[in-house]
Image: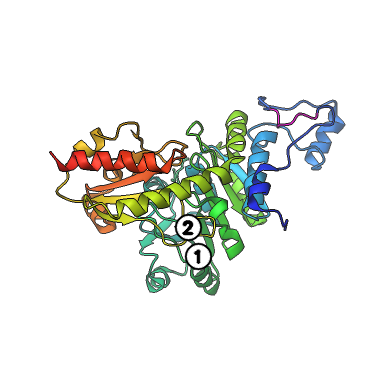
Amino acid sequence: MSKQSIHTQIVHQKIDQTEATTSKTTPIYQTSAFTFRDLDHIEQYYAGEVPYLYTRENNPNTAELGQTIAELEQAPAGVASSSGISAIMAGILAVAQAGDHIVAAEDLYGGTQQLITKQLASLGIDYTLVDFSSNDAITDAIQPNTKLLYTESITNPFLRVEAIESLVQIARDHQIKTMVDNTFATPYLLQPYTLGVDLVAHSATKYLGGHSDVTSGVIVGDPDLIAKANQKVVGLGMNLSPYEAWLTVRGVKTLALRMREQSANAKQVATHLSENNGVKHVYYPEFVSHHGNGAIVTIELAHNLDVTTFFKSLGWIKIAPTLAGVETTVSYPSKTSHRALTDEERNKLGINDYVVRISIGIEEGDDIVDQLNQAITAAKTV
Ligand SMILES: *Cc1c(COP(=O)(O)O)cnc(C)c1O
């Protein structure tokens, strides 16, 4: 592996250049198919000597995104897809089919939880959701037909940092695969494949793209499993468009700068809010990586605050049911990401009506702290 810093690696990805052009950035191959000189040329495609035939199957821009993230995760192979959810679905279907069973963390991203409990269950893939902070709970949930342990490297909204090494050990002891959603950490903070995880998924909609202007996904990992995941992406039509792939790759180039700045701002916000008596609890990881602890801060407001007033008093901080853009935004898990859960499920996870998730941006840290303090003050004086 390269000795370059990840800051250098992130910017200097190999770009696809034809012999005729030497453009500084990869062109957008906005084409649904590729042409062939003659029948021999088609044969060359099927012999693996010519890379592209039809964009749903492969395209230079989507290939570039898959390879870029594979390299940053230090994994041998990767494939891009239409969204984080489709990347996760392709990864799970690469490992499990009807009649199989998967064990997943109970505190997953809401959309992933729905994917597992509704969509994949309807295709005959059985599941058990358990508390992944307990190795015994994981081990007890494993059945003879269990094929996969599934979790997130940093969970949402309470930012539990998964003990990946012990998870990998449990999986190996039972000869089953592991898959980790690394969206919140990004390869800048954590590289789960290097810790033995078989498949690493991303919602590239979030930090990889970084500008809230694209929906895309990537899955990287073991080459045989990625080949199977790629068959699912192609065969189920979960491919990413060339333009969206290009936008995502463009975003990735500033990943290190954004994550460094956003993590530093997040640490500042977490420190200040833990000293504010309008905040009952601050959730922010103590240690994720020497590059930082991530850019999400979740708070539980004191229960004597008026939550409606808090959300009305945020000034330039917008309310958005997403995260990871360059602007600071807040979301309200109980009414957005975790809305589909029952009250009982939400309570079990600790998501009450005072929980607010803050996605910290690249603004000046002091300004973010001031604006949040203003909203808290306003919500106290109602
Ligand atoms: C947003 C998100 C997803 C889903 O990704 P989409 O791009 O919206 O399909 C999956 N996992 C995590 C952790 C997310 O934040």
Q: Where is residue 32 in the image (x, y as percent from the top left)?
A: 66, 26
Q: Are marks 1 and 2 in contact (CB under 8 Å)?
A: yes
Prevailing secondary structure of the magenta residues: loop
Amino acid bearing label 2:
Ser
Question: Element type at marker 1?
Answer: helix
Task: Report the side of 15 relative to 140 (left or right).
Answer: right
Q: In which image quadrant can residue 159 be found?
A: bottom left
Q: Which residue position holds label 1? A: 164
In which quadrant of this rendering is ligand 1 seen?
A: top left
Q: Does the magenta stretch include residue 23?
A: yes
Residue 331 in view (yes/no): no
For the residue pair 357 and 134, the one nearer the viewer reads as 357
Q: Which residue position holds label 2? A: 153
Q: In which image quadrant can residue 14 be found?
A: top right
Which is nearer the N-term, disc 1 or disc 2? 2
Image point 47% across, 37% down: which residue?
326
Task: Report the side of 16 relative to 7 (left or right).
Answer: right
Residue 298 vs 38, above or below: the answer is: below
The span shown in magenta is: 22-27
Amino acid bearing label 1:
Ile
Q: Position of residue 377 (x, y in %)?
A: 21, 42
Q: How far apart are marks 1 and 2 (CA)?
A: 7 Å
